[in-house]
Image: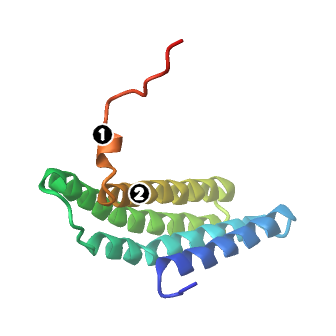
Amino acid sequence: MRFGSGVGIEAMSGIGAIVLGILSLLAIDAAILLPVAAIMLGGTLILTSGALSQINSVRLEVDDSQRRAETIALAVLAAATVLQIFMGFAAMALGIIALTGIHSLVLTLVAMLVVGASVLLTGAAVCRRMVGSAGYDSFFSSSKTPSTPSD
């Protein structure tokens, strides 16, 4: 596991979040541990946004017919990177406010929703970029329905 990449940071943060979640389930000061987990995961979103930028900076060899799709995929991934940074700051801010004790549970849950939404959106953008680069665009853009054998 390389710690210079986003994968290493995400793995360590994920392990930390699991540990904090288990400790919270064991009733060890959940009002503190869960907002700390939100702050940690928000920071992870910010730190790993550089890995998304590296993925987006790779220029792929595509046919002229797929050039427009590649341009759109690049724009979507760039937008997802910026969105991930903003969502990371939002999760950290919600976690910090939750530590003050003001609606701690609600703010922590919203922070976790923000982290989950960010991971979903950026994961989908990266998947689209990689699937498009592998030449599977025709598979996803096909409107044909699979034929069923007739009796």
Dot 2 surroundings within 10 Å: few (below 14), some, or many (20 or more)?
some
Residue at the image position 81 percent from the left and 69 percent from the top? 23
Residue at the image position 62 percent from the left and 79 percent from the top? 12
Is residue 100 in view from this perspective?
Answer: no
Distance Cα–Cα, label 1 vs label 2? 15 Å
Q: Residue furthest right?
A: 26
- Say left or right for 119 vs 73: right
Q: Earlier in the sequence, mark 1 or mark 2?
A: 2
Is residue 53 in view from this perspective?
Answer: yes
The answer to which of 57 and 9 lies nearer the viewer is 57
User: Badge 2 is on which residue?
Assistant: 127
- Say left or right for 69 vs 16: left
- Nearer the observer: mark 1 or 2; the answer is 1
Amino acid bearing label 2: Cys
Residue 141 tag number: 1
Q: Residue furthest left?
A: 64
